[in-house]
Image (cartoon, rainbow, N blue to C red):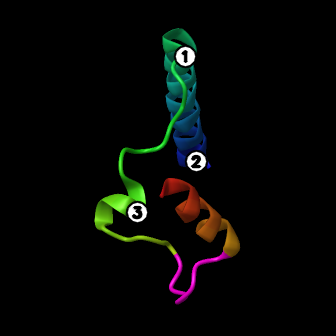
Amino acid sequence: MEIFLITFGFFLVVILAMAVGYIFKRKEIKGSCGGISALGMEKVCDCENPCDRRKAMMAQKT
């Protein structure tokens, strides 16, 4: 039980440090640069036809 409490306390300290860094820098939290498109994939799913939402997004790009 002692190891669990020490580990839990450590994680709380790390999360608190990240929160303080976010508060002082005032930067938006954003995703990584690239994601799925960096791997050369057009879509996430394995379906042959994209869904309606994806078709609408593709139509707006062109």
> Label 3: which residue?
36
In the image, which disc is placed on residue 20? 1
Nearest the viewer among 28 and 8 is 28
* Residue depicted at 55% across the width and 16% down the height: 20
Which mark is first along the chain, 1 or 2?
2
Q: Earlier in the sequence, mark 3 or mark 2?
A: 2
**What's the magenta region?**
45-51
Query: Is residue 44 or residue 23 the one in the foreground?
Result: 44
Q: Main secondary structure of the magenta part?
A: loop
Q: Which residue is mark 2?
A: 4
Amino acid identity at mark 1: Val
Identify the residue at horizontal 30%, vertical 65% (top origin): 39
Crowding around mark 1 (Cα neighbors within 10 Å: few <14, some 14 to 19, many 20+) is few
| Mark in front: 3 vs 2 | 3
Relative to the observer, which residue lies in front, 6 or 55? 55
Q: Quadrant of residue 38?
A: bottom left
| Image: 37 above or below 47 | above
Q: Position of residue 30 (x, y in %)?
A: 51, 36
The answer to whether 56 is drawn above or below residue 45 in the figure is: above
Q: Amino acid at mark 2?
A: Phe
